Image (cartoon, rainbow, N blue to C red):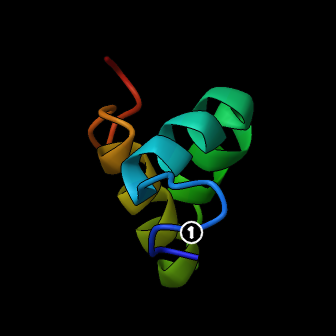
Amino acid sequence: MFKNNPNTGRSFSEWAKEVYRQEKDIIEIMYKSSDLYEKAMASMIMKAAGCGSNGKN
């Protein structure tokens, strides 16, 4: 999931940008979650997408 997929050649940051663009509301809800795993995943996606941890950018 986090490695380059040989079928698409996309990096994690490219994947994260696409996911954040398509599912911004869900990622932001995950970031506000009390579940530390969800919050960490959302934070990683947001940072890789170039949105920092606050979703602004």
In the image, 7: left or right of 46? right
Extreme residue in the top direction:
57
Quarter of the image holding residue 25? Answer: top right
Give the residue type that dot 1 points to: Pro
Q: Is residue 7 above or below residue 1?
A: above
In percent of the image, x 64 and y 33: which residue is there?
24
Q: Nearer the viewer, residue 45 or 30?
A: 45
Q: Nearer the viewer, residue 9 or 38?
A: 9
Residue 53, given in percent of the width and then of the height, sits at: 31, 44
Q: Which quadrant of the rendered structure holds the C terminus?
A: top left
Residue 33, given in percent of the width and then of the height, sits at: 59, 64
Residue 32, given in percent of the width and then of the height, sits at: 54, 54
In percent of the image, x 43 and y 58: which residue is there?
12
Q: Is residue 38 above or below residue 28?
A: below
In the image, 22: left or right of 4? right
Pointer 1 local density, CA inside 10 Å: few below 14, some 14–19, many at least 20:
few
In percent of the image, x 26 and y 38: which residue is there?
52
Q: Which residue is mark 1?
A: 6
**Of helix, strand and loop, which one carries label 1?**
loop
Q: Which quadrant of the rendered structure holds the N terminus?
A: bottom right
Q: Is residue 11 above or below residue 52?
A: below
Residue 22, given in percent of the width and then of the height, sits at: 73, 31
Quarter of the image holding residue 55? Answer: top left
